Amino acid sequence: MKVKDIINNRKRILPVLIFMGELMSGFVFSGASMVGTSAFSDISIAGAAGLVGSGAVFMGSLLRGFADASIGKNIVKLSAMVMIIIAKLLMDNKRSPMLCGIYTALSVLFSGLAVSAVIGELFYKLAFYIFYSAAAGFTTYSLCRINRDIENGSAVRLTASSGCYYAVVYTIYTASLCSVKLPFLNAGAVLGIAVTMLASFYYGSTGGVICGALTSCAAYFSSAETGAALVLLPAAGLFSGFIHQRRISVAAAVFLTMGFMLTVLTGTSEEVVSSLGNYVLAAGIFIAAAPYYSDRHIRVPQSTKESGEVMQARLAFLADSIAAVRGDARKTADKIAEKNRASYTAKDDTEEVCGRCYRRYICRRQGSSALKGLEALSEMSEISLETFPAELDTCIRRNELMAARQKGINDETIAKLMDMRKSDCRGILSEQFSIVENMVREISEDKEIFYSAPISITVRNKLLKFGFSPSYVNASYNSRGRLIAEIYFSAGDAPVSATRICDLISDELKLKLTSSDIVSSGSEVRLRLYEKPTLNLEVCTASKKGDETDESGDNFCRCSDGTGTGYIVLSDGMGSGKEAAFESSLASGLMRRLIGSGVGEKASARIVNSVMFSKSKDESFATLDILKADLDSCELTSLKAGAAATLVRHGNEVIRISSDSFPVGMYEESDITENVCSFGEGDIAIMFSDGICEGEYRFIRELLMGENDLKSIVDEICAKSEKFDRSEPFIPH
C-alpha cells in the first residue's frame, strides 16, 4: 500500500513539477541573449509545450520583466508568446512538431514586424525578423521532436536528422545559459565542458570533438569573449578521447590538463581565468555523473568496422552451426545406408548365357530368326512363358535366358529407383540452398539492434580479470532497451557453467541478467546474457497415452534463442511406440538446437524437414507444431506442419489457428503454414499433439473463457480426452 501511495503521489506531483520547471525556464531564459540580441529560448519552450506549459513560460517571462524592468525590452517576445497561446487555444492545443514550429515562427514574425512598424523601423528590421522567426520556429520544431521521443519512451538517436535536432537544441540552450550571469562562473560553459568530457570518455575522440565544437559554437553565440576562452575545447575533447574507457579519475585529470594548457594558449584575459574555474567545476560534475551514465537510451552512429565485425561473427557462428547439424545428419544417413546397402550392376546377362552355348554362332547370324528373338527379348519389360518370343522356342538354354533377362529387368528397375532417389537428392539440395539464402537474408535485414561498445569492453575486461578468455563480446540493446550480451569462446577456453559468468557480469553492470544455454558450433561456443522481458512465459503440460503398454510417440520441448524470446515445440511421430518416439524426438531436438544457435524458426523447420526426408529410405514423418512468443512486441507466431489446431485466448475472444499442411519428412520441400497474432498479459494458448472433433471446441472455449489457472485448464482437457474421442484420445500440451 505504501508503494501504491508513492506511485499515486508521483503521478499527481509530476505535472506540478513540470509546470514549475516551465515557469522557471521562462524566468531564466527571458533575460538570455545571443549574438547581441535577445535569445528566443523561452519562445521555443512556449511553442513546444502544451497550452498550460506555454502559459507557465509566459508567466515566468512576465515575472522576470517585472523584476528587472525589462518588459519594454522584451515586448516582441512577450507578444509572440501571447500569440502562441492564442493559436494553441484556437487549434485545440495540437502538439504536432510541424504545427508548433509554424505557430512559433509566424508569431515571432508578426510580433516583430508589428513592433517595428510602430517604432518606424520596419524596413530596416524586416530581414532580421524573417531570419529570427525562422530560427525560432526550427528550434521549436526540433524541441517538439525531442519531446515526442521522450514521451514515447524512445531512445535518444544522435543519427541523421534526429541528431541535427539534438545539436540545434543543445547549441541554442547552451548559448542561452552562457549569457546567464553567475559569480566567477559561466553556467553554459560548465554544462558544455561536462558534456564534452562525458562524450570523449564514452565515445572517444569523435564524441569529444563533436560536443566540443557545438559547445564552442554556443559560447561564441553568447559573446566573443566567452567563445574565445572555449575555442580550443574541441581539441581537448580530441586528445582526451584517445584514452577513453579508462579510469574516470584519470580521464578527468587528462582532460583538465589538456583544457588548462589549451586555455592558457588563448590568452590571459579575465574570461580565460574564469574559464579555468569552469573546467574544475565541470570535472567535478563529470566525476559524479560518469559512473551513472548509460548508453541504454542514447544511440550514436556506429563505425563500419564495429558493425562489420559483429555481422562477421554472427554469420560465421551460424554457418558453423548449420555445418554441425548437416554433419550429424550425414552420419545418421551413412549408418543407415551401411546397414541396408546393396550393390546392383545392370549388364547383358543373355550375352553371358549365349557365350557358353556351342550354337551361338548359328543363332546370332545376321538375319536369323533366333537373333530377332533375342532382340525382342531384350526389349521386354516383363518375362513369362506366355510372352517368351516364339523364335526362341527351340533354344536349348531357354530357362537360363529367361532367368538372365529377369535379372536384367530387376537391375533396370533398381537403376530407375536410384535415378529417382538422385532426383530427390537434387530437390533436397535445392531446398537447402533456399534455406541458407533465407537465413542470410534474415541476418542482413536491418533490425532495431543497437550495439554498445562501452558495455562490450566492460564485459570483456571483467571476464579477463577473473580468468576467462572470450574471443569477442557483443553487447547490444534491442528495440525495447533490453540488454543482450553475446560472449564467444573458443572450444578450448569454453566455460564449464554459465552461472558464474552471469553472476560476474550482473554484479559489474548492476543488472539482473539471465543466461542462456551454452551453444557449441564445434570450434566455438556462445553464451548469451540478457535482461528478462516485462512479460513471462508460463508453460504447463499434461499427457495421456492411448495404450499404457506402449511408448508415447510425442515429444515436447521449451527453448529460447538466448534473447528472451520463448519457443514451444511439439512433435508427434507417425505410427506408435519407439519408432514414432524416435521420429518426434529427432524433429523436436533438431528444432531446439537450431533455434538455440540463432537460426530463425521458419528456416529451422525447413532444415528439420530436409533431414527427416533424407535420413533413410523408409518413410519417416512427424508433425511439427511451433509457437514463438516475442515477449517484447507481444507477437505470437505459429508454425504448423501437419499439426492439430491451436486455440489462443486473446482478451475476450478465442482464436483458432489451424492448417492443412503435411508433416515434415514427407516431401523434399517443406509444407509449413505460418500464422501471426497478437497477445497480452494473461492470454493462453493450448496446443494438442492429436486433433479432436470439431464439436468439442465449444467445451474448450468455455473452459478458456471461464478459467485463468493454466494448470487446471490443461488437466481438465486431458482428463476428458477419452470422452472427446474414445477410439483415439488426444494429448494436450
Image (cartoon, rainbow, N blue to C red):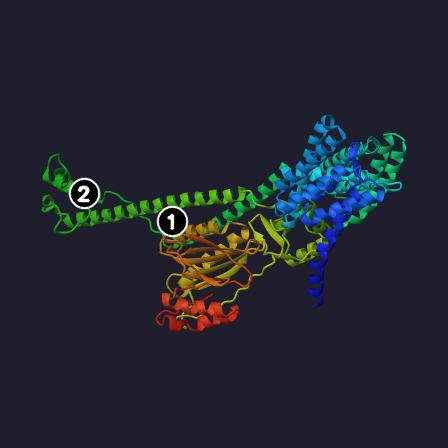
SS at badge 2: loop
Quadrant containing the N terminus is bottom right
Furthest toward the top, the residue is 123
Residue denoted by label 1? 668
Residue 532 in view here: yes
* Mark 2 neighbour density, 10 Å: few (under 14) some (14–19) many (20 or more): few
| Three-letter residue code for mark 1 | Glu
Crowd band around label 1 with a 10 angstrom C-alpha radius: few (<14), some (14–19), many (20+): many
> Measured along the vertical axis of the image, is residue 122 above or below residue 153?
above
| Cα gap from disc 1 to disc 2, whole angstroms | 34 Å
Can the viewer see residue 138 in this picture? Answer: no
Which residue: 87% across, 34% down? 271
The answer to whether marks 1 and 2 mark residues whose Cβ atoms lie closer than 8 Å is no
Closer to the camera: disc 1 or disc 2? 1
Q: Is residue 408 above or below residue 228?
A: below
Q: Could you say where residue 589 lies in the image, as x and y percent from the top left? A: 49, 57
Q: Is residue 528 left or right of residue 648?
A: right
Q: Which residue position is annotated with label 2?
A: 379
Left or right placement of residue 21 versus residue 492 in this view: right
Position of residue 124 measured from the top left corner of the image (x, y, whole percent): 74, 26
- Amino acid under disc 2: Glu
Q: Which image quadrant is residue 701 in?
A: bottom left
**Between disc 1 and disc 2, whose residue precedes?**
2
